[in-house]
Amino acid sequence: MASSICRTLKLFQPTTCHNLKSAVALLDVRFPQSTVVPIRSKKRYFIPPKVGMKQRTQDEIEAQARASGMVPRQEYMERAINIACTAGIFDPYVPPEGDARLSTLSKEGLKQRTEQLRQSAGSQLAIRKIKEHDSEFTTKEFPTRAQEIFIEAHSALTQFDKVKLHSLVTERCYPEMVRGNRYKTIRWRFIESLEPPRVVHARCPDMVSKGNLYGQVTLRMHSRQTLAVYDRFGRLMLGDEEEPRDVLEYLVLERHLVNPYGRWRLHGKIVPAWAPPKDPIIKSVMIPGPKLKPEEEFEELNYEVPRPKAVQWNK
């Protein structure tokens, strides 16, 4: 079958070529001065600018487009909205200086005491609203559960368990916890509680609409922990695994009260203004060695490596 088709095509080929040649010769006889005009078969979407043409501004381009009947499309800088959590901490708790210890009757001390009384009155109203939507919420049992959420979240962070971490922290807190930890190794351990955790602040704000309520509870936690951060080469950058430290933290937990399937999650942390500065991060520096010639070896030079001073950079 294939051979018969090839033979048929071969028979038609000389006839077709002969007819084309005769047609071209006939055109040359009738139109001796005819020229070939090139036809553009494909539309060019980009036309290069003319030589020596000045660069136009965006307003001039839009004006020319409107004059030709084309309306330029407007660009909107839209930002995604997530209603599962709020974008920040509403009316944050102001920790008293010295961790609730009695201070002298100074001007700053009176301001702190007045602010603490005002915040405690608002916390009682917020706790009543939270109990209307969450019947199991109590100020006595909630601190224990909040401390368990804190420990589970940091354990998932050290193991890089993203699925579990998303269920324990809000969408606002997640990028703050994982930022800068891609090529690092974290060793964290919770040892004990020096003081029982307690609720010190509560707020019940709404977002988007008036009935869309969120519960925010601030927890005071004084505990002993260990933390060590290693870089991608295994060098120690911060902390020590064997040296426990006393840590005083003010944690904010949040829950979407309108959602029946909502749960309490870690939302943020309040750092007081009187808190001591963090320890600087220790980074290792490579010390360049001597330049060797092709016939030399490093062992024959008896090169002594100098001991430079420790170089530290703050975060």
Image (spheres, grey):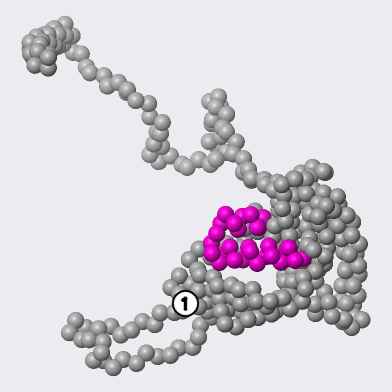
Report the amino acid beneath label 1: Arg
Q: Position of residue 312 (x, y in %)?
A: 53, 80
**Looking at the image, residue 277 lies above or below residue 213:** below
In the image: residue 314, left or right of residue 223: left
Q: Position of residue 301 (x, y in %)?
A: 26, 91
Q: Position of residue 184 (x, y in %)?
A: 50, 68
Q: Quadrant of the N terminus?
A: top left
Report the magenta residues as a range.
143-170
Quarter occupied by residue 246:
bottom right
- In this rendering, does residue 17 appear at all? no
In the image: residue 144, left or right of residue 283: right
Residue 116: say if magenta.
Answer: no
User: Please, what is the dominant secondary structure of the magenta stretch?
Assistant: helix
Quarter occupied by residue 62:
top right
Residue pictured at 22% horizontal, 18% vertical: 36
Residue for badge 1? 235
31 or 21: which is nearer to us?
21
Q: Position of residue 64 (x, y in %)?
A: 54, 31
Please tell me how crowded label 1 is: few (under 14), some (14-19), or many (20+) other residues with Cα within 10 Å: some
- In this rendering, does residue 109 appear at all? yes
